[in-house]
Structure formats: structure tokens, C-alpha cells
């Protein structure tokens, strides 16, 4: 195999005999090599072969940001889910889950522990996904030596649910409508046009879907960390003001009252999206 592109010391790309691009992970696999060199096959630890071209491009965009240990663990978790769940898992989970784990590690380092307002529902209505996610959390503990909070089981399970193809439990029409309405509020509030093909947009939409599902099903379970809620409200006033507009709209049109957990959760992820937009 010939190196087509070098992302960093641990990640390169190549093509197979069908001219399909592959991402190759391995410690030092790109170190002191150049495009056109033979890949040292003894260094290969993981091979990513994604069928969807758009997802593959998004995945290539994040591999330089996410540590190799997280990418390896993500691949093992996806393999675990596909083996144990009797459902088709979209390749998009490689992007969303690796990015989520990376973000979760960063939050842990900063002491920002957030509660997931969907924990009760996921544990009771998506038991198979929850059980696999529990195994995934054990795997992450072994690989990264980090004690993630129990709520991360729910977070990982939601990535499985979101990636399941043809999930009939979701009202896709209403979900897509609400997503668009919320995104319009965000665009008008910040007076920006968001790049809908970007990785950062993909990240935010992934998290927003979970919230929209709760609004549509009127499923409320509040478990807010009030101290963290107040910290976020004071530190990100403009983003929190936008969340307030979303809250007013949802109350009026969907008869749904956002909990403090949901306001906290969305503020953190929206601030992340807008920070990247401002930096660019």
C-alpha cells in the first residue's frame, strides 16, 4: 500500500485495489515518511473503510484533532455495537462518537460534569443500546484510564440510536421541521449563515436532534446541576439569550417548557459552534 496523504505521525490514507480511499492508523505510521512511500504494514493498528463519501470527508476533517487512542476506541465500540445490536449502524457514528468522546475528555479535564436529561428514557426504552453503551464505557476506562460519569452511558447509547438506520420510533417529519425552526432562530439571532457541510455543524445537529426528540414526545426529566447552570448562564450571556428565544418559541408552538438541564446542555454545544464560527 502506498501513502496517499499524511495527516499526522499516526494517521495516513491510501487506496485499495478498487480505488477506495482508506484511513490507516498506527503509531509512527506517518513519521519521517512522505506521500508515495510504502506503508509499513507492521505499524498498522486500525483501518477505516467508510462507504459514504460525505461522511468519510467529515471523518478526515476530525482525525487530526482527535487523539489516536480515542479513534481506536471508537472503532472498537462501533464494532461492539454492530455485533450486539440487531440493527444497521450508519458510518456517521465514527464522526459523531469519536468527536463526542474527545469533547467529553476535555470537559472532564475542566471539571465540567453535565447531566444528560435523556438518561431515564434511554435506559428504559432503549435497553439494548444502553447495555452495549455500558460495555463501551468499561472499554473506554480500560483504554483511556478515565472514570467517566454514569451519564456517559446514556450519551453513547444515544449515538447508537441516532446512527441506527430506519429507526421507526422517530417522527422524522416533525423532527426535521423542529430542527429547521431552531436553526432559523439561531441564524437570525447571530445574523450568520452556517456551513451545513462543515464538521462543526454536523456536531451541533447531532446534539440538537436529541433535544428535539424530547420536545416532540413531551418527555421531561430534569436533573440540572444548578451551580453549573448559573456559571454557564453568566459566562455565555449572548448564547444563553439565543437559547431563551428558542425556549419561548417552543413553549408557544409545542407547549413544551425547557428544563435547566436542556438549557445548559444546548448552551454549551451552541457556544462551541459559534466560537468556531467567530474564530473563522
Image (tube, helix red, strand yellow):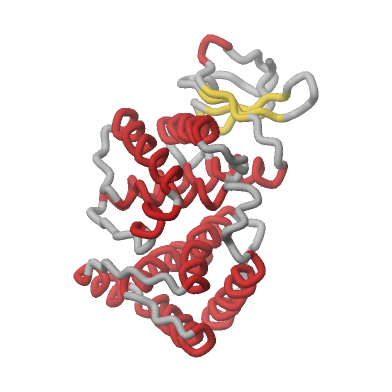
- Residue pictured at 51% horizontal, 69% vertical: 212
The image position of residue 241, as x and y in percent, is: 41, 82
Residue 111 screen position, x and y as percent: 23, 54
Q: Residue 130: image x %, image y %? A: 40, 45
Q: Quadrant of residue 147?
A: top left
* Residue 24 vertical placement versus 237 (above, below): above
In percent of the image, x 65 and y 40: which residue is there?
56
Asked if residue 39 lies left or right of residue 111, the reply is right
Q: Quadrant of residue 181?
A: bottom right
Question: At which x and y percent is residue 221?
Answer: 33, 68
How many numbered circles does the render carry?
A: 0
Say above or below: 241 vs 236: below
In front of the other: 279 or 14: 14
Does 52 sit left or right of 18 as displayed?
left
Query: On screen, 194 above or below 58?
Result: below
Please name whichever residue, 36 or 88, is drawn nearer the observer in this view of the structure: 88
Residue sticking out furthest to the left:
227
Going 63% across and 48% down the picture, which residue do you hit? Answer: 165
Locate the N terminus and report the quarter of the image it occupies.
top right
Q: Quadrant of the C terminus?
A: bottom right
* Closer-to-camera residue (225/69): 225
107 and 93: which is toward the camera? 93
Amino acid at each position: 500500500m502506498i501513502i496517499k496523504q499524511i495527516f499526522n505521525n499516526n494517521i495516513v490514507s491510501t487506496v485499495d485495489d478498487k480505488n477506495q480511499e482508506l484511513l490507516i492508523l498506527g503509531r509512527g505510521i506517518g513519521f519521517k515518511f512522505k506521500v508515495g512511500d510504502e506503508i509499513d504494514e507492521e505499524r498498522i493498528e486500525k483501518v477505516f473503510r467508510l462507504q459514504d463519501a460525505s461522511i468519510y470527508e467529515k471523518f478526515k476533517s476530525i482525525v487530526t484533532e482527535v487523539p489516536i487512542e480515542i479513534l481506536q476506541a471508537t472503532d472498537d465500540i462501533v464494532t461492539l455495537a454492530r455485533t450486539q445490536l440487531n440493527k444497521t449502524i450508519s458510518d456517521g457514528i465514527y464522526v459523531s462518537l469519536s468527536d463526542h468522546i474527545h469533547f467529553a475528555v476535555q470537559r472532564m479535564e475542566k471539571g465540567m460534569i453535565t447531566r444528560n436529561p435523556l438518561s431515564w428514557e434511554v435506559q428504559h426504552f432503549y435497553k439494548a443500546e444502553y447495555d452495549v453503551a455500558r460495555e463501551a464505557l468499561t472499554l473506554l476506562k480500560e483504554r483511556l484510564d478515565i472514570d467517566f460519569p454514569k451519564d456517559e452511558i446514556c450519551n453513547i447509547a444515544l449515538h447508537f440510536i441516532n446512527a441506527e438506520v430506519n429507526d421507526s420510533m422517530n417522527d422524522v417529519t416533525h423532527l426535521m421541521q423542529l430542527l429547521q425552526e431552531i436553526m432559523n432562530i439561531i441564524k437570525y439571532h447571530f445574523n450568520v449563515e452556517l456551513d451545513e457541510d462543515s464538521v462543526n455543524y454536523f456536531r451541533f445537529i447531532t446534539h440538537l436532534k436529541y433535544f428535539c426528540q424530547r420536545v416532540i414526545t413531551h418527555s421531561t426529566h430534569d436533573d440540572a446541576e444548578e451551580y453549573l447552570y448559573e456559571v454557564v448562564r453568566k459566562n455565555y450571556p449572548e448564547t444563553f439569550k439565543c437559547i431563551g428565544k428558542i425556549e419561548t418559541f417552543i413553549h408557544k408552538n409545542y407547549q413544551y417548557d425547557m428544563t435547566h438541564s436542556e438549557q445548559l446542555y444546548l448552551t454549551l454545544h451552541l457556544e462551541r459552534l459559534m466560537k468556531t464560527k467567530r474564530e473563522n
